[in-house]
Structures are given as C-alpha cells and as structure tokens.
Image (cartoon, coloured by chain):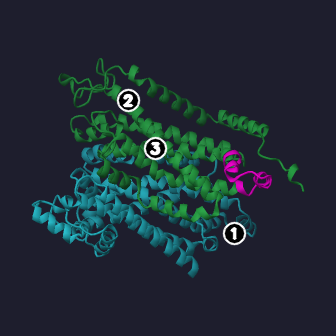
C-alpha cells in the first residue's frame, strides 16, 4: 500500500506559496491595482456616506429644484424636489453595493452546498440539475416581477430575486470544480483513510474550491449591481424616497426636457462600480490561473 | 443521437412541469382571493361564485392543477383585470414586437461580437486587441437601460435621427418599423455582443494555438483562409452557446428596453401589469417566459449537437 505516502492535501505550505504568488501577480497588474483602489474607495465612501454626505438625502428645497451641477452649496446640483444630488448618489451607491453583496451572499449560501453535493454525490446530480434548469427558466426580471406581485417591491426582494437567479451559475462552477478535485489523489487518499463524505467535502474539497467561488462572486456582484439598477429604474426595487441610482435615472427620464444632465451621473457611477468589479474579477481569474500568463 | 434527443426531451418536459407547479403555487400565494383577482370589474357575490365554479376553485388542489394545466395548454390565461380583454389576445399583439426586437438584437450582437472577437484574437497584443477588450468590458458593465436613455436624450430628441418612442407593425410599413426598432435593438444587443466577443476571442486563441491550425499553416494554407475557416466554425458554436446561456438575460433586457423606448411588447405589458396588479397577465407572462426559455433551450441544445458532434457523446455542453 502506498496510501500513506500520498500527500494528504494541497498542504499548508503549498497553499501559502500559492497565495503569495497570486498576490504578487495581482500587484504586478496595473489594472488590478487601479480597480482594487477604486473598489476600496467606493466601499469606504459607502460605509461612511451617512456621515460624509453634505446633506440629508430627504432634505428638500422647493425654491431650488433642478439646480445644475456646479451650483454653490450643491456641487452636483439638485433634483426635482431640490434634494442634493451628491448626497443621493453617495447613498444610492451604498444601496447598490448592499444589494450586490446581499444577492451574491444569497446565491453562495444556497449554491455552494448544492454545487458540492451535485459534484460529489452521483445520485444527487440529476436532481440538482433539474433544480438548476427550473431556476434558469425564470430570468431575474421575471423572478422579480413574480416576487413583487406576491410580496411587494423592496430592496430585500430585489436582492433575493437577483440572488436566486444567480444560484445556477454558482452551482455550475462549484460542481465542476468538485468533480475535478474528487478525482485527485489526495481526496482518494482521505477516503481510503476512512474520512467521512462530509469531512472530505468540508476539509479537502471546499477549501480548494475557494478560488473558483471567489472569481464567481467577483463577476456576480457587478451583475447584481446592474440588476438592482434595472429593477429600481422600473420601480420593482428600492422604493422612493430611499435613494437609489436606478430610481434617480427613472426621475431623470421623467424630467429629461428640464434637466437632461441628471441622466448622466447616476449611470456613470453604476458603470464605474460594475467596471471596477469586472476588471478586478478578470485580473483575479488570470492571477489564479495555474497556466500562468496566458492573457 | 436518438438517445440524447430523448433524454433532453424528457428533461425539458420535466422542467416544464416543475415550472408550471411553481407558477401554480405562486398564484395561490398571491395576496387576496384568486377569484377576486380573476373577476375584473364585476365583483358581485354571484359573479365570484360563477368564477369559482368556472375555474374550479372549489375543487381539491390536484384537480385544480389538472384543470389549470388544461386551460393553459388551450391558451386560456383568463381576462386582464385592467382592460377586460383576454390575456391571450394581448399576447398575440405584444409577442411579435418582442420577438422582432430580440432577433434583431441577436443578429447585431453576433455581427459585432464575432467581428471584434476575431479581430482581438488575430491582432493579439496590438492596440486593436486592447480596444476590443476595453469595449467588451464596458459593454459588460454599462447599464443598458441607461445607454437607451442617453440615446433617446442625445440622439433621438437632439438630432431627430431616430424616433424617441412608439412602434409601427412590420406588416404596415417595414421601413418605418425598422426605423423605430433599430435603436432599441442595438442597445439590447450591446451587452450580448460583449459576451460573444469575449467567448469568440478565447475560442479563437485556443484554436489558433492548436495542432490542426499549425498543420494547416504548415501545409501552406494562407493565414486568412485558416482564420476564416476556423473562425466561422468556432464562432457559430460560440454564438449558439451564448444565446442559449444568455436567453434569460436577453428576455430581462428586452423588458427594460421596451419600457424605455415605449415599444408595445411583452415587456411593457409585464411592467404595466405589475403596477396595476393585473394578476392574470402577470401569471401568463411568468409561465410563458419559463415555457419559452425551456423550449428554446431544448432547440439550442439540438442545434448545438448538430454543429458539434462531441456534445452527443458526453451529453454535457459547456
């Protein structure tokens, strides 16, 4: 028996060197650094926005509606009710990030265990595949429409609808990585060694699947941010008067003749957030790719 | 082949059944009495009683479900609470608009995406690749309804090149129809184009470094011939795959695009229905979307197995 000489896992020293290699690759990629700094700043502003925002988001000023950007006291102008646009953009971006994280957390909590089970237990695979097919048949907007009809429109329901729609993607990547890991020697060794299925999944497969889960999450967040903007724009997401970039754009469309510039900034912020996540996600995937610097 | 076809058909049928159950249960989870929701204007106790009997709401649940499936299969989706017209006739006017918009968007996305993807792979490391990659990343990150908004504000309203909203049926005036729908189709197509571009680029890079391309080059085939032959075969697979995988996104995108450009399609009907609590319409929309998704994906898989015979062996596309 050679079982005892088989390495038991991608050992801890190996994973440390792997982590430093990934970090080094990220640091050397200027796009990764820039997008990370943008995301860190956005996260900081979002966290501190209740204190950083120059005005309360609900503070109206009917004598001063549709002030253009550059107006004294209102750097980015005011909206249809005379509320400060900069303050509302800051808190709107905070809401976008909240929905993004909440949606992705929802999809991971449900998708990761199902993906592990589908990849590890042959018998579960068919059942989970049908479940995935079922979820895919309801696009996120239709899911949101159904949820809004049953439970009403809100930030939470929008995040849940987006999160549910993202579950199939999580299941797919986790399942295929589990299939790959399951066939490796160290897993076989653990099984021969008498480890239970749960132990193998929790100690050997899940830790090694973290990188694909991380990449999946990084590309799912910008999709969720765009999804929130769409739902709020349509009135199915965050409800006024709570600030949201999507509803700001809906208002801008309504008053396009009076204040066409109002349609520009919220969109730029949404795009900036999504772009930073997508660029960082690409860089992360390249850095984690064991094949090295293909791209 | 026959076996693969049978398996896929059985899986699709099962998914269709499951999604019907989900919608059926969802309708029962709606706030209020379903009879009230189906009643429309006339809400007298007699009318409600008649509706309960007609829709079998007094029967046990399995019987109700069987009757429900029977009605849906016959295209009886009830009557819109808002307009009083049968939902099925609303669908016959709305669906062609959405189908035309989506098909046009797919064509535009395929042309842009494949073109840019091949260019990026062939011009590896040159400015053309950077430009194509950058545009694809922006295409993935931009909220498309916002692009539509800007297009209306700065293209339609400012220059008058395109109508800002409205629709003319294709049978009435094909030129005017295209004039109204081309801008929304471009907007809807950009997101899909970005995904197709990235997939095409990576498929091309893989095949350009493969043995058979090296062989083709070695035997003296002109580089252009190598690229076009392999690019065409690969990009066909990429487009079919992406359209299959992104169908849900396309449907969601069509809903928003129609809303912005005021196109009287499926999406506008959906959003109006949500705000008017027009439950029969919402139910029909959700069920039909799921059915369309399942049926179209079944055909996408078939097409896929025709283009790439390896799929039939493993039965596992992507």
Frontmost residue, A287 versus A190: A190
Based on the picture, tell me whether residue B300 belongs to the magenta stretch. no
Identify the image quadrant of residue A13: top right
Disc 3 crowd, CA 10 A, few/some/many (<14, 14-19, 20+): many
Q: Is residue A195 magenta?
A: yes
The tint of chain B in the picture is cyan
Magenta part mainly helix, strand or loop? helix
Position in image of residue B218 (x %, y %): 75, 66
Instruction: Provide the secondary structure element on which disc 3 rests.
Output: helix
Q: Quadrant of the C terminus of chain B?
A: bottom right
Name the residue at the top extreme. A72
Q: Which residue is mark 2?
A: A91
Residue at the far bottom in the pictured view: B2
Front disc: 1 or 3: 3
Q: Residue at x 77, y 38 (%)?
A: A12
Q: Colour of chain A?
A: green
Residue at mark 1 shares a chain with residue at mark 3: no
Magenta region:
A181-204
Q: Residue at x 90, y 56 (%)?
A: A1
User: What secondary structure is found at the residue carrying circle 2?
Assistant: helix
Q: Tell me: B33 left or right of A44.
A: left
Q: Which residue is mark 3?
A: A103
Q: Which residue is mark 1?
A: B221
Alpha-carbon span between mark 1 and mark 3: 51 Å
Q: Is residue B190 visible?
A: yes
């Amino acid at each position: 028996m050679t079982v005892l000489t088989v390495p038991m896992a991608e050992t801890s020293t190996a994973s440390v060197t792997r982590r430093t290699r990934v970090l080094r690759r990220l640091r050397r990629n200027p796009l990764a650094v820039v997008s990370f700094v943008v995301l860190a700043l956005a996260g900081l502003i979002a966290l501190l926005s209740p204190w950083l925002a120059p005005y309360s988001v609900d503070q109206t000023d009917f004598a001063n509606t549709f002030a253009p950007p550059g107006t004294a006291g209102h750097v980015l102008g005011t909206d249809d009710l005379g509320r400060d646009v900069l303050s509302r953009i800051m808190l709107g971006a905070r809401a976008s990030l909240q929905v993004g994280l909440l949606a992705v957390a929802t999809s991971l909590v449900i998708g990761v265990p199902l993906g592990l089970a589908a990849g590890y237990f042959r018998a579960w695979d068919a059942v989970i595949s049908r479940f995935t097919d079922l979820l895919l048949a309801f696009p996120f907007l239709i899911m949101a429409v159904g949820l809004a009809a049953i439970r009403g429109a809100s930030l939470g329901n929008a995040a849940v609808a987006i999160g549910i729609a993202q579950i199939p993607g999580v299941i797919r990547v986790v399942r295929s990585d589990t299939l790959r890991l399951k066939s490796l020697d160290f897993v076989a060794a653990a099984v021969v060694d008498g480890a239970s299925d749960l132990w193998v999944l929790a100690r050997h497969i899940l830790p090694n699947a973290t990188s694909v889960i991380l990449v999946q999450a990084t590309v799912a967040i910008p999709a969720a941010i765009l999804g929130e903007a769409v739902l709020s724009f349509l009135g199915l997401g965050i409800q006024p008067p709570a600030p949201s970039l999507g509803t700001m754009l809906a208002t801008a469309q309504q008053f396009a003749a009076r204040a066409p510039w109002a349609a520009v900034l919220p969109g730029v912020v949404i795009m900036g957030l999504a772009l930073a996540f997508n660029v960082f996600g690409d860089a992360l995937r390249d850095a984690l790719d064991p094949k090295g610097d293909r791209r | 082949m026959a076996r693969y076809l049978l398996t896929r058909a059985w899986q699709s049928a099962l998914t269709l059944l499951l999604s019907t159950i989900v919608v059926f249960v969802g309708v029962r989870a709606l706030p209020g009495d379903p009879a009230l929701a189906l009643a429309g204007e006339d809400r007298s106790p007699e009318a409600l009683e008649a509706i309960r009997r007609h829709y079998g709401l007094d029967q046990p649940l399995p019987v109700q479900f069987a009757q429900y499936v029977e009605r849906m299969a016959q295209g009886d989706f009830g009557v819109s609470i808002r307009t009083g017209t049968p939902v099925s006739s609303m669908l016959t006017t709305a669906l062609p608009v959405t189908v035309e918009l989506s098909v046009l968007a797919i064509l535009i996305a395929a042309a842009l995406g494949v073109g840019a993807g091949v260019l990026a792979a062939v011009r590896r490391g040159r400015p053309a690749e950077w430009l194509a990659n950058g545009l694809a990343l922006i295409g993935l990150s931009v909220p498309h309804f916002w692009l539509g908004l800007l297009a209306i504000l700065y293209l339609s309203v400012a220059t008058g090149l395109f109508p800002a909203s409205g629709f003319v049926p294709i049978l009435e005036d094909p030129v005017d129809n295209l004039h109204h729908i081309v801008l929304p189709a471009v907007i809807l197509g950009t997101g899909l184009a970005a995904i197709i571009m990235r997939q095409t680029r990576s498929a091309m890079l893989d095949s350009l470094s493969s043995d058979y391309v090296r062989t083709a080059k070695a035997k003296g085939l002109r580089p252009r011939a190598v690229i076009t032959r392999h690019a065409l075969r690969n990009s066909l697979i990429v487009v079919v795959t992406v359209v299959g995988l992104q169908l849900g996104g396309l449907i969601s995108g069509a809903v928003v695009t129609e809303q912005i450009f005021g196109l009287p399609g499926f999406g506008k009907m959906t959003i109006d229905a949500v705000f008017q609590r027009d439950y029969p319409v919402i139910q029909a929309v959700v069920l039909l979307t799921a059915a369309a998704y399942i049926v179209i994906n079944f055909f996408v898989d078939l097409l896929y197995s025709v283009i790439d015979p390896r799929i039939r062996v493993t039965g596992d596309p992507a």
